[in-house]
Amino acid sequence: MKIATYNVNSIKVRLGHLTDWLKESEADVVCLQEIKCVDDAFPREQLEDLGYNVAVHGQKTYNGVALISRHPLEDVVTGLPGDDGDEQARYIEAVVPAGDTVLRVCGLYLPNGNPVDSDKFTYKLSWMDRLIARAKELLALEEPFVMAGDYNIIPSPDDVHDPKAWEGDALFRPDSRAKFYELANLGLTDAIRACHTEPHLYTFWDYQAGAWQKDNGIRIDHLMLSPQAADRLSGAGIDRMMRGREKPSDHVPVWAELDF
């Protein structure tokens, strides 16, 4: 089963890129971020025509996440537990049948957090605390799950073209990275790093300053696997060619293959 995450940076603008990539990649389950539309405006029919089931947690103009799956989506949860007052559409979760078991898929769009001297950074760290709490709840179930999405966190200097340039940024601040490692240290596996140890693997290139042409990228899109999912990991990759297409998202799809 191929599980992927893809920040499309507007589903309206990038629908053609998404459908082309789905046909090429044959991904089974995809977590989408920054769809930037309300539920009713999501292009459900076009994706259902390709054989996908759809679950959406949208928001006008900003944020928005969705799950699309070749398998049924069951027990759909929208919104990250822990703050009933949080109105930002950043989290969606569902269960999909997987062989003789099930796989829980959690799609997330973690807050950016900049500027760091604002409430946005406080929100980012508190959102991560809620994600960690949710991971603890799911780990107690002892079932395979994946938390996949745009984490807006650069885990290490190996994941950024110029660590010095990102010092002080919310994506690379020590407290942001500490939260990411707190999540990982619960027993979750970073799918890309489990399969690829070489540095300078990127999933995002800014639109400014020729970042793509210079390969000035960062790795901020991650698939974190529970122990039961990590035991089934057979491969992972980054489809960086998508960044070179006309009018692309600034992110590219990242995927993992699990043997079910």
Image (cartoon, rainbow, N blue to C red):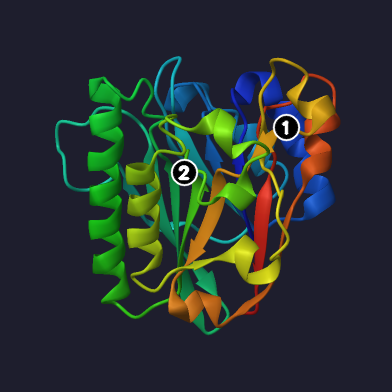
- Helix, strand or loop at label 1? It is loop
**Which residue lies under the disc numbered 2?**
151
**How many angstroms separate mark 1 from mark 2 (CA)?**
18 Å
| Camera-side residue of 148 and 174 | 174
- Helix, strand or loop at label 2? It is loop
- Compared with 10, 159 (above or below) is below
Q: Position of residue 106 (x, y in %)?
A: 43, 54
Quarter of the rendering containing residue 213: top right
Q: Residues within 10 Å of mark 1 (few under 14, many from 20)?
A: some
| Camera-side residue of 137 and 238 | 238
Instruction: Please give left or right for residue 190 compared with residue 22 in the image.
Output: left
- Compared with 114, 194 (above or below) is below
Instruction: Please give left or right for residue 63 compared with residue 80 in the image.
Output: right
Quarter of the rendering containing residue 57: top left
**Identity of the residue drawn at 43% across and 44% down:** 108
Q: Are marks 1 and 2 in contact (CB under 8 Å)?
A: no
**Identity of the residue drawn at 31% across and 63% down:** 135
Question: As shown in the figure, which amino acid type bears the numbered disc 1?
Answer: Asn
Mark 1 or mark 2, earlier in chain: 2
